[in-house]
Image (tube, rainbow, N blue to C red):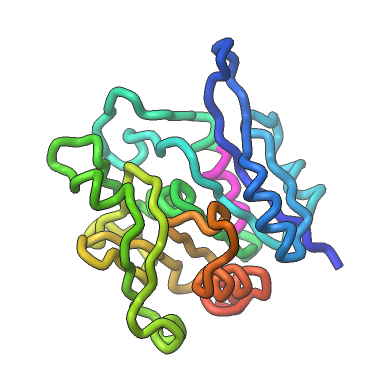
Amino acid sequence: MNKNLIITQRHAPDRHGSPTDSLENAYVECFSALGFTVFPIPTTIPHPDRFVSALDPVAIVLSGGGDVAPDLYGGQAVAGQSLSVDRDRLEFQLLDFAVRERVPVLGICRGMQMINVYYGGSLDSTKLSAAHNAEDLLSPHQIMFEDSTLLENFPEGCQVNSYHCQSVPLNLLGQGLACFACHGNLPLAEGIRHQKLPIAGIQWHPERSAELTPLDRLLLGAFRDRRLFWEVSH
């Protein structure tokens, strides 16, 4: 049975200044262990629709790393951001495909932020003076759940890792999106889902743990099996 999974990659200059794709091995190991056959998609591929059509993926992952371009959400450009117009464009095209074909999508960190921006939402950044303290974001912290299944399994919430500088404020969610997990201390979304489509994102990195936490086993298993937020009949 086809278990092809398409995953996006970082896109940034290498040490010679040449634009380069890269993907941490941890992503491949994590999703391969779930039974997927993982296909990283080249960021600057001329015809991504042909790549996608040839693979006929059962799922798509928008990976982490880098920043979403501020002009996509009315934000302010900040020195030091790692931006890629090509990656933003590709991920919009993949989301277009997923919406059209009802293919499950999981956004991880930047990928969750991209889902929010795709649906007209906005982002905040710890690099801006008016933003939240970076220490509150860039360290493990507690999250709480607003979904009945997750509440039943984790009534006290869970601790998750954190590596991001941009964030999704609860009052800036995109159209059709709902928050299923929120930061324990700040008004920020840690998990979002589309209310009618099998598209959801998480702000933390399950692939960076030595082994999957009970929360990540539940969520990634649901993603693989098209349950919970990823039911195609959604």
Query: Is 60 part of what is drawn in magenta?
Result: no
The residue at the point 74 percent across, 46 percent down is 39
Percent position (x, y) of residue 43? 62, 33
The residue at the point 21 percent across, 61 percent down is 186
Residue 167, placed above or below residue 44: below
Residue 90 in sight here: yes
Drawn side of residue 120 relative to residue 131, left or right: right
Q: Which residues are magenta?
A: 90-98
Residue, far front: 210
Q: Quarter of the image holding residue 192?
A: bottom left
Residue, far right: 1
**Foreground of the two, 63 or 58:** 63
Residue, far top: 16
The residue at the point 58 percent across, 20 percent down is 19
Q: Quarter of the image holding residue 151?
A: bottom left
Q: Quarter of the image holding residue 13?
A: top right
Task: Count the marks.
Answer: 0
Residue 197 in sight here: no
Percent position (x, y) of residue 142? 31, 67
Drawn side of residue 117 relative to residue 126, left or right: right
Residue, far bottom: 152
Drawn side of residue 50 relative to residue 190, left or right: right
| Most common secondary structure along the magenta stretch | helix
Query: Is 92 part of what is drawn in magenta?
Result: yes
The residue at the point 44 percent across, 73 percent down is 195
Residue 12, placed above or below residue 110: above
Percent position (x, y) of residue 175? 35, 61
In the picture, the quarter occupied by the C terminus is: bottom right
Percent position (x, y) of residue 232? 62, 74
In the picture, the quarter occupied by the N terminus is: bottom right
